Image (spheres, grey):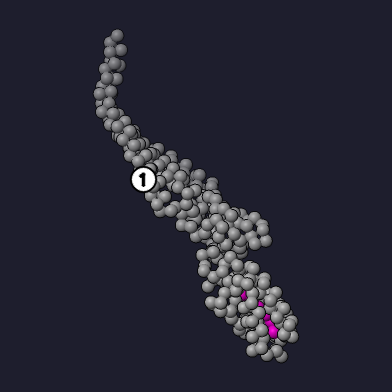
């Protein structure tokens, strides 16, 4: 009986000693949770006003709320008297291990968040990422789904888009359509220039301002390479590209201008 009384006294002493701290910890938890919930509501409103992508808003809110709740829990534990250093060390070690195991995926994930927040491109834009060009079908959290101009589906890791060179052709007011024509040395440049300019000006979609240009690009061993530079709106680029080539071939044939062949000529879009 006396032993039971000793135990009861010890328990009573512990309750008296820890009750205030325990009560304070509970109050801190309850008030802290309400404050965090209010902050999350305000954050969602701020993200919406900042026009942050709708897909990434819940993610930012969830991650921020989880971190705040973990800090709140540690604060409450320290009030009670629980040593939190060991818990922090375990969480840090676990986070490091997970980060090393998912290094590639996490880099794509972080890049996806940056793309959705800063919007270097969005769905429907015509972009060139590294060597791939096409319309963005969807921006996912890990990958960007593109539909190339030959209607192939290309999945580009977001880390490649953030770490590499991205050309967004849809943000440019107009594009320069780069064409090259090989002319024999015996032809008169002024006559060929007039034929080419008249041909591209008749192509639907070619802009009057800036005006098309024709110039000598380089002298090859067997011919002269001419640069033909009409301009078009970004959505009309490929229509103008192919139509201008057809018009040039027809105009050169009608004018009796010989067309030479030059190897290694590359043609592609250059924004202005």
Which residue is disc 1 drawn over? 42
Give how far across and how far down residue 75 sits, in percent. Answer: 33, 38
Q: Which residues are magenta?
A: 178-183
At a point 74% along the width and 85% down the height, the residue shown is 256
Give how far across and how far down residue 180 sits, in percent. Answer: 65, 78
Of residues 78 and 36, which is closer to you in this image? Answer: 36
Give the crowd class for mark 1: few <14, some 14-19, many >=20 residues within 10 Å. few
Q: Is residue 164 left or right of residue 40?
A: right
In the image, is residue 5 above or below residue 129?
A: above
In the image, is residue 110 above or below residue 228?
A: above
At a point 49% along the width and 48% down the height, the residue shown is 55
Of residues 225 and 104, which is closer to you in this image? Answer: 225
Quadrant position of the N terminus in the picture: top left
* Residue 230 visible in the shown view: yes
Q: Say whether residue 191 is magenta.
A: no
Q: Is residue 12 left or right of residue 209?
A: left
* Residue 80 visible in the shown view: no
In the image, is residue 13 above or below residue 100?
A: above
Give how far across and how far down residue 107 sits, in percent. Answer: 51, 52
């Amino acid at each position: 009986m006396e032993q039971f009384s000793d135990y009861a006294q010890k328990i009573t002493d512990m309750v008296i000693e820890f009750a205030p701290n325990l009560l304070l910890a509970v109050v801190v938890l309850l008030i802290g949770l309400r404050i965090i919930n209010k902050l999350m509501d305000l954050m969602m409103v701020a993200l919406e006003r900042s026009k942050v992508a709708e897909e990434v808003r819940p993610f930012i809110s969830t991650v921020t709320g989880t971190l705040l709740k973990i800090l709140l829990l540690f604060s409450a534990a320290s009030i009670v008297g629980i040593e939190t250093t060991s818990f922090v060390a375990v969480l840090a070690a676990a986070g490091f291990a997970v980060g090393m195991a998912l290094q590639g995926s996490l880099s794509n994930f972080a890049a996806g968040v940056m793309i959705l927040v800063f919007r270097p491109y969005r769905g429907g834009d015509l972009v060139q990422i590294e060597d791939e060009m096409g319309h963005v079908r969807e921006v996912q959290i890990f990958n960007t789904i593109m539909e190339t101009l030959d209607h192939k589906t290309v999945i580009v890791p977001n880390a490649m888009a953030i770490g590499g060179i991205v050309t967004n052709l849809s943000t440019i007011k107009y594009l320069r359509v780069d064409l090259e024509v090989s002319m024999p040395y015996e032809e008169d440049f002024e006559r060929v220039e007039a034929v080419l300019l008249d041909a591209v000006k008749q192509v639907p979609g070619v802009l009057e301002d800036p005006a098309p240009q024709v110039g000598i690009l380089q002298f090859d061993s067997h011919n002269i390479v001419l640069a033909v530079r009409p301009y078009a709106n970004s959505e009309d680029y490929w229509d103008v590209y192919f139509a201008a080539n057809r018009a040039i071939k027809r105009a050169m044939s009608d004018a009796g201008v010989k067309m030479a062949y030059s190897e290694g000529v590359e043609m592609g879009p250059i924004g202005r």
